Amino acid sequence: GQNIDQPTEMTATEGAIVQINCTYQTSGFNGLFWYQQHAGEAPTFLSYNVLDGLEEKGRFSSFLSRSKGYSYLLLKELQMKDSASYLCAVMDSNYQLIWGAGTKLIIKP
Amino acid sequence: IAGITQAPTSQILAAGRRMTLRCTQDMRHNAMYWYRQDLGLGLRLIHYSNTAGTTGKGEVPDGYSVSRANTDDFPLTLASAVPSQTSVYFCASSDSLAGGHEQFFGPGTRLTVL
């Protein structure tokens, strides 16, 4: 079966760094996505990795290891507005997205 | 303003009633999707359409139907609503034919079936 695993909830302090992990087992792989979702709102795109390595975009970075079925999202210089759920999704062999349940990130002052 | 709109924003529905959730995009994206999101679960694909005139079943299609008469509109119909269809429904689109796999989401419809 297809499976995406990520922690249910994480807590971090404003100004700090946090790493959200995602492991996956899917039928085929055509890329891994990270989305941010604030409570009561729609998911919004953060990053896309299809090759191994680190992609940096401002305060956010995303890493992928295809051989390990593993990705992480790194958030630096945390701000209160980063309090949200972070969704990991893998595009399978049919180009459909398989979604994890999301990690709720709580930022404390 | 470019993007995806959904209607209604929220709805309370009696079990057994028919309901159509509307979704319209103005980005000329070829692909459109319907997801449901339930607490503790990831987004689950209900139906999708890769181009106007074609549709396909996702992970949880039972009890739902869709149509794609043109590029912009992708309505989702619940023929006879049941309480287990209480959820938040998101419509999304992507420009997949141009290699753009990023999906853009509408604001969602919160549906309660009693």
Image (tube, rainbow, N blue to C red):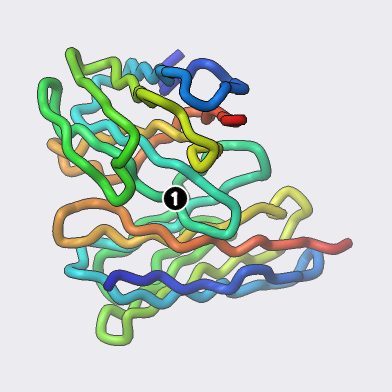
Residue A22, percent from left and from top: 46, 73
Residue A106, percent from left and from top: 75, 62
Residue that numbered label 1 is attached to: B43
Query: Left of B63 or right of it: where is A108?
Result: right
The structure residue drawn at horizontal position 40% and vertical position 17%, both measured from the top left corner, is B20
Query: Left of A43 or right of it: where is A71?
Result: left
Within-10-Å neighbours for mark 1: few <14, some 14–19, many 20+: many
Answer above or below: position of B16 versus A71: above
Specify whether residue A51 is in view. Answer: yes
Viewer-side residue, B90 vs A89? B90
- Secondary structure category for the residue under label 1: loop
The structure residue drawn at horizontal position 68% and vertical position 72%, both measured from the top left corner, is A17
Quadrant in the picture for residue A64: bottom left
Answer above or below: position of A67 versus B8: below
Give the letter of the chain under mark 1.
Answer: B
Quadrant in the picture for residue B4: top left
